[in-house]
Image (cartoon, rainbow, N blue to C red):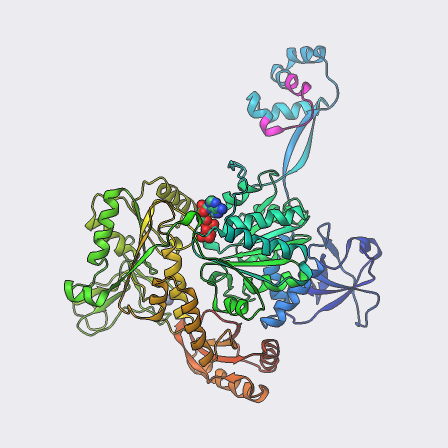
Amino acid sequence: MAKANYIRVIIDRAIHRELDYLVPETLADRVGVGSRVRVPFRDKSTLATVVAALDHSEAEGIRPIEAVIGEAPILSEQLLELARWISAYYCCPIETVMRSLLPQVIRRAEVGWKKQLFVRPARKIDNEEIEKLRKRAPRQAELLEVIAQLEGAMRAADLLRHTSLDNQTLRALVRRGLAELHEEAAVRDPHADEQFIATSNLVLNDEQSLALKRITQALDSPEDARPILLHGVTGSGKTEIYLQAIRAALERGRSAIVLVPEISLTPQTVEGFKGRFAEAQDAVAVLHSHLSEGERHDEWHKIHSGRARIAIGPRSAVFAPLKSLGLIVVDEEHENTYKQEEAPRYHARDVAVVRAKIEKCVVVLGSATPSLESYHNATTGKYRLATLTQRVDEKQMPLMRVVDLRQERRKERAIAILSGKLRGAIADRLEKREQTILFLNRRGFSTSLLCTNCGEARNCPNCSVALTFHRHVARLSCHLCGHTAAVPKKCPACGKDALIYAGFGTEKVESTVSQIFPKAAVRRMDADSMTRKEAYRETLRSFRAGKIEILVGTQMIAKGLHFPNVTLVGIINADLALHLPDFRAGERTFQLLTQVAGRAGRGETPGEVFVQTYTPFSPSIQFARHHDFAGYFQQELEFRERCDFPPFKHAILITIRSGHEERAKFSAETLMRRLKESLSPEFILGDPMPAPLEKLQGEFRFHILIRGEAIMRLSRLVRETLNKLPFPEDVTVTVDVDPYQLL
Ligand code: ADP
Ligand code: ZN
């Protein structure tokens, strides 16, 4: 480490600038770029990250740092560069970026390794000594007998368990100078008590081999490698390619990151990776959101120290501190969960592409339904395309049947949850002992409580949405802010006893299915039924074992699951996503239908999918039905170009919110005027509008949408404009670059 006289740091507070400090002689050889330090700031002290080492500083009244946190620098220069890029691109202060880049346990360095006590004999102990002790203290002698024979050290806890003796006895031996205790760091491995079955490479088919070759060629000349988009239909064996590509990276002395959507970081996935790289117990570090602080600390250091060469995790794993990174895989690259919905509002796929460029490594984006942005990049040559058109082992793509709910409605009068056709198909599967998945992206029993007299719905007092009725708790609840309310007997607005439940969610589907098929084993899987951490694993296990015949669920069951005995998938209402006020509505519908359908027919028997809809001829549904990605892409791309939406233009969404409607509105209008002055005409500036979700958690919201090609410049102009404007204290302004949430 180069010795520095001065350092420049970013402190962990929003002050929007960097500060210089002096490094005392005594600390000089422990500080470098990427170190964490404690520094004085005003009349307090605070933690900070070192971003540069300086020979001299012009700063006035420069003060020395107080301490160095941890032993080695925790951020590489490449990760610092990445942080700066995120800050500039996503229009977000760098200290906020640091919060995402480094887990809190690492930033604060409050949690250390878990220490465990080990015992060993203090010196050579002969039998005579043990016998002498036996007369006075038989239990101590008994313990000493075991300790005397130890080759090395033994965990104190294990020793006491084996001998059924207690801690006091052990302490007494230590006091007599016969035994010695010392502490050693023990790694908290969340997967320690699981056995992973070692697997080896499968023989790839031709399409797979070609795709892998693309990747290994890139690994051999990473300097000029372009990102690779792996477009492979569901069940085409993309995971096997990832595994072999990672092997190839390891063989070249490089490490790898695998990003998966949070929702598909299942035990099944973890097992797949741990099993393939089982030769070294620590080879794979798993970073998911359920880790305890201690486990997170250990996994992070396992990666940082180089013991783990592969990091797998959701979004934030893109920041895993691996050295000599060779490969980043982004699985299901089209997934919205890669976008962080709080500052820094980064998209992990895009950050992965930038990190790969900085680290000179290969990035592979995989999906059966690539995002319009990525596919566009592949067709224009910015990315390379590798395609898998076939399922492995010549398995058929599932047969998609569209059920026109308008006709069903004419036939049956009542609103059908299960059309006659879908009901028949389920009965057929039950008979054949095959499994069914029913998908509906809406929780709860009824989605609103309506008065048939005055027409009022029970709305959330804090948000502009209706309250959902949950039958298992017999309450109304808001899915946005968590507000709950008792179910009124009479309409609180008009006093009439005329309330009806309208709309339905997964809870109602589950109960309807159980009524129609009273003997079937039905289970529901959504955020309400999966509140316990274990419930998720347990449900998947029972489903795999065939103990559940019909699984009803939300997007939780849409992705990544691989159950060979599922031959039927029912999409209860394909229109839900289509009617959102969002330019990606069509894209989301196409992706969801294709992904959910992909759960069917992954075993020997071909799958069948029923898509229930009121708009059977909408393009997303028709293209999904024919497994026609290219057709869908073409028509969607034309629409985006006509309307100046991504991938042709970038968008920035500014949200202005406040508990006072007038103040939010006024601030939005003021901001709008300033933006008009500072933005050149190449940028398309929309008028401030009430957000589609006008009120959320008690605040009124206004949107300003800006579009343009030169996103870095646009980001900078927006940031500069905002910095110059004083907003009232009760007005909050957020900036979302490349937004995914337009509500
Ligand atoms: P995808 O992620 O593309 O939807 P998967 O990776 O889940 O598909 O693969 C589907 C199944 O096919 C998995 O059980 C996988 O082990 C198996 N598989 C993949 N490649 C091969 C191969 N070359 N030969 C035999 N089986 C394969
Ligand atoms: Zn609410």
> Where is residue 644 drawn, in percent x and y?
48, 80
In the picture provided, is 708 more to the left or to the right than 697? right
Q: How many marks?
A: 0
Residue found at the very far front of the displayed protein: 206
> Where is residue 328 drawn, in percent x and y?
59, 56
User: Is 658 situated above or below 597?
Assistant: below
* Magenta segment: 144-158
User: Is 163 situated above or below 104?
Assistant: above
Q: Residue at x 45, y 57 (%)?
A: 389
> Where is residue 552 drawn, in percent x and y?
31, 52
Could one spot residue 357 in this view of the protein?
Answer: yes
> Where is residue 446 drawn, in percent x and y?
26, 61
User: Is 383 situated above or below 546?
Assistant: below
In the picture provided, is 675 more to the left or to the right than 622? right
Point out the image quarter for the N terminus: bottom right
Quadrant in which residue 439 is drawn: bottom left
Viewer-proximal residue among 467 and 484: 467
Could one spot residue 289 in this view of the protein?
Answer: no
Quadrant in which residue 24 is drawn: bottom right
Residue 429 on the magenta segment: no
Viewer-proximal residue among 546 and 598: 598
In the picture provided, is 104 more to the left or to the right than 570? right
Viewer-proximal residue among 113 and 330: 330
